[in-house]
Image: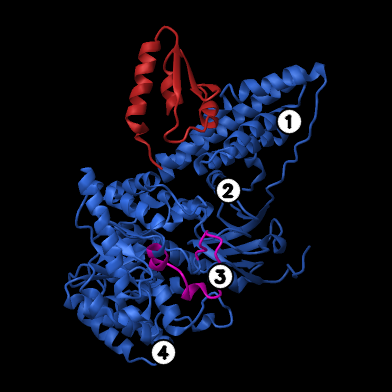
Chain colours: A red, B blue
């Protein structure tokens, strides 16, 4: 879901957890980050539309990804 | 190795998991193990190898899009997601570019490079705590298999004969979806259970299927003529002309019946003389949710919550994990109610606690475990109470034998209500609480229990086993397992009378509810609700709609006086024939 949202923007998008950093536009990257609920993540956006991209991803987090089991 | 003479007719039995009758040639499908070798390529073959890889990826992409489309159409969006995600992974830089890089700089063959890259990602996922992610590691393995197969011998599908019955050791759900496009007639597998994903998928696709046939792959050769009867779980290999004629006739009648059933789904569940009976669904998997509406069920009469746990092979799921699942079910089934049966570990459902008993059916199971293990009960109760805000639901307690268990449970539920009130959370403060009537003592003491609970649900499988002292898994006595024994019927009658005197309803959720042949008796005994696997509901409804309550009551009275289950069955058969419902008895076979 993150990957699909991020793909709509130009800006590069990275997610950091502990010492790892992965490409937020890569589904395999996001999966292998193995972020469980409650994990502390740092999101980095770089590029022309970085603000819009950051806003869209933040909304996704706030909505709890509309997640289902 | 053929130990059996394969030129003459013989029968192999398994578990029929998707109904229907298939007649056609066998196709023996070997899910070849693809041994991956560390193979390097010469530099002049470099470009060729990259092209080969690109072709395999684009073919895999096409496969997956096709599978996703079929899954979406037949099973809904959520089932298709898994394949869409796999397709995305193919073009993901972390896979595609990484493989290309290994081919270019390390001169790895495409197969080996794909293996190396995927293994790396899989290890990361498998190292994690999350079961969800470990399942995704399996998806990656599927994906790797798929790409490697395309690399090695092109299209997987071209190997399958259309219009054949696929015989295999085991298949994945994805295999079944893909094969159904080749118009295969059905499938017979060595392994698998009624609740495995492949069984579920076969049912959803309407493909006759039998699993648990232990060794059928050793008795069948490609091209052998087969009859596959998904209703009885029987495969006839090299049938004689007489057998073929019998099954062709049965197939014709079954198709006729199916047509009638389709019409019946939208009709009300009402007897001929206007008495309403609620037909509900028994569910185990989230993926089955769509069947509730498809087969015209008015709610879920039994959701076996332990299956969520067993599928993740874990003793505990967090409140949050459970809540999400329960909420989704409740919202999907609303405005009809969903009945959540509290965790029922023990008996034949192995408690994943590393705990062994000599006699598990008489041991620590159901509510006995729940009350002893607050760390299991409390999160489940909180998850259910949270879900109650999103649609109507009921709670069902398994394996109750004493009133004290009901009191203790209600106390725990009361505590959770208090927590919610304190935390300012929204919930339904009057969730109906019912008990399973599956132990004879509860049926005998039904009057006392009826004053304490909001409904009864009769589990005929265990009630039969406990009343007749028969383990139906034991071949030596399995023929004595008779759900229609007059003793069982007597216990049902007692339970209904006690319930109705206190103004509460009674449902039957055991296999007896799925047997249309038994519907007249259950109605005659006063049952208010029947809950069964959705696919059986149209047939139950068809019989139900021909019943007049007065006659059903008379039939039940007669059955209670019968000598044994065989006499009850004969009574029913006569009755069904007189009421022009005899096709139903055909399904019993």
Label 3 to label 4: alpha-carbon separation: 34 Å
Which is nearer the N-term, disc 2 or disc 1? 1
Q: Residues within 10 Å of mark 3 (few under 14, many from 20)?
A: few
Label 3 to label 2: alpha-carbon separation: 33 Å
Q: Position of residue B67 (x, y in %)?
A: 52, 39
Q: Which residues are magenta?
A: B349-371
- Please give the name of the residue rendered at 53% of the width and 75% of the height, measured from the top-left corner: B359
Q: Label 4: which residue?
A: B564
- Choose top left, top right, bottom left or bottom right for residue B123: top right
Query: Given contact means CB atoms under 8 Å apart, are the residues at marks 2 and 1 in contact?
Result: no
Q: Is residue B65 left or right of residue B547?
A: right
Q: Label 2: which residue?
A: B172
Q: Is any part of residue B166 visible from this angle? A: yes
Same chain for the residues at labels 1 and 3, yes or no? yes
Q: Residues within 10 Å of mark 1 (few under 14, many from 20)?
A: many
Tell me the element at label 1.
helix
Q: Name the chain letter of the residue that bears numbered label 3.
A: B
- Please give the name of the residue rendered at 20% of the width and 52% of the height, measured from the top-left corner: B428
Q: Name the chain letter of the residue that bears numbered label 2.
A: B
- Please give the name of the residue rendered at 36% of the width and 49% of the height, measured from the top-left corner: B290
Residue B366 located within the stretch drawn in magenta: yes
> Which one is in front in this view, the residue at disc 1 or the one at disc 3?
1
**Which of the numbered marks, if any, corresponds to residue B112?**
1
* Residue in the foreground of this view, choosing between B355 and A24: B355
Label 4 to label 2: alpha-carbon separation: 43 Å
Q: Label 3: which residue?
A: B245
């Amino acid at each position: 879901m993150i990957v699909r949202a991020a793909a709509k923007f130009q800006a590069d998008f990275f997610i950091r957890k502990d010492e790892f950093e992965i490409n937020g536009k890569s589904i395999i990257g996001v999966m292998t980050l193995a972020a469980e609920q409650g994990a502390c993540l740092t999101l980095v956006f770089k590029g022309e539309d970085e603000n819009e991209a950051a806003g869209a991803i933040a909304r996704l987090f706030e909505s709890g990804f509309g997640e289902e089991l | 190795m053929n130990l059996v003479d394969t030129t003459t007719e013989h029968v192999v039995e398994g578990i029929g998991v998707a109904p229907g009758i298939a007649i056609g040639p066998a196709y023996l499908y070997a899910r070849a193990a693809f041994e991956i070798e560390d193979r390097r390529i010469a530099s002049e073959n470099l470009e060729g190898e990259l092209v080969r890889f690109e072709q395999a990826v684009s073919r895999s992409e096409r496969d997956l899009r096709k599978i996703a489309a079929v899954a979406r159409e037949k099973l809904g969006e959520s089932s298709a997601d898994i394949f869409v995600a796999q397709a995305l992974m193919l073009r993901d830089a972390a896979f595609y570019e990484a493989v290309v890089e290994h081919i270019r700089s390390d001169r790895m063959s495409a197969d080996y490079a794909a293996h190396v890259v995927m293994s790396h990602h899989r290890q990361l996922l498998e190292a994690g705590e999350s079961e969800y992610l470990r399942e995704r590691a399996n998806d990656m393995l599927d994906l790797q298999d798929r790409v490697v197969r395309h690399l090695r011998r092109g299209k997987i599908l071209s190997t399958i004969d259309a219009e054949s019955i696929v015989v295999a050791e085991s298949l994945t759900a994805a295999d079944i979806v893909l094969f159904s496009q080749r118009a295969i007639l059905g499938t017979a597998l060595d392994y698998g259970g009624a609740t495995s994903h492949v069984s579920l998928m076969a049912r959803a696709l309407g493909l006759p299927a039998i699993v648990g046939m232990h060794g059928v792959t050793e008795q069948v050769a490609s091209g052998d003529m087969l009859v596959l009867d998904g209703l009885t779980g029987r495969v006839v290999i090299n049938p004689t002309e007489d057998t073929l004629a019998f099954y062709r006739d049965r197939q014709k009648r079954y198709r006729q019946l199916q047509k009638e059933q389709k019409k019946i789904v939208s009709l009300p569940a009402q007897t001929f003389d206007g008495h309403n009976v609620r037909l509900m669904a028994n569910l185990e998997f989230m993926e089955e949710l769509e069947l509730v509406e498809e087969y015209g069920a008015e709610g879920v009469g039994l959701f076996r919550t332990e299956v969520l746990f067993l599928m993740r092979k874990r003793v505990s799921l967090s409140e949050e994990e459970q809540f999400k699942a329960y909420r989704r079910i409740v919202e999907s089934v609303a405005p009809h109610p969903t009945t959540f049966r509290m965790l029922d570990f023990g008996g034949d459902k192995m408690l994943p606690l590393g705990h062994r008993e000599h006699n598990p059916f008489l041991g620590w199971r159901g509510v006995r475990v729940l009350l002893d293990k607050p760390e299991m009960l409390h999160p489940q109760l909180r998850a259910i109470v949270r879900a109650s805000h999103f649609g109507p639901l009921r709670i069902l307690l398994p394996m109750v034998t004493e009133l004290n268990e009901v009191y203790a449970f209600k106390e725990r539920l009361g505590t959770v209500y208090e927590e919610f009130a304190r935390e300012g959370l929204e919930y339904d403060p009057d969730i109906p609480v019912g008990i399973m009537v599956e132990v004879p003592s509860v049926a005998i003491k039904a009057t006392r229990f009826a004053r304490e609970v909001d409904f009864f649900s009769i589990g005929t499988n265990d009630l039969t086993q406990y009343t007749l002292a028969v383990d139906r898994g034991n071949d030596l006595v399995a023929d004595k397992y008779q759900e229609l024994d007059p003793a069982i019927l007597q216990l049902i009658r007692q339970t209904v009378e006690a319930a109705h005197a206190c103004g509460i309803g009674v449902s039957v959720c055991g296999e007896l509810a799925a047997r249309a042949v038994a519907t007249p008796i259950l109605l005659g005994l006063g049952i208010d609700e029947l809950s069964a696997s959705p696919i059986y509901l149209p047939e139950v409804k068809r019989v139900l709609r021909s019943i007049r309550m007065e006659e059903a009551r008379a039939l039940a009275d007669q059955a209670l006086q019968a000598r044994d289950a065989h006499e009850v069955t004969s009574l029913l058969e006569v009755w069904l024939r007189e009421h022009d419902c005899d096709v139903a008895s055909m399904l019993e076979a």
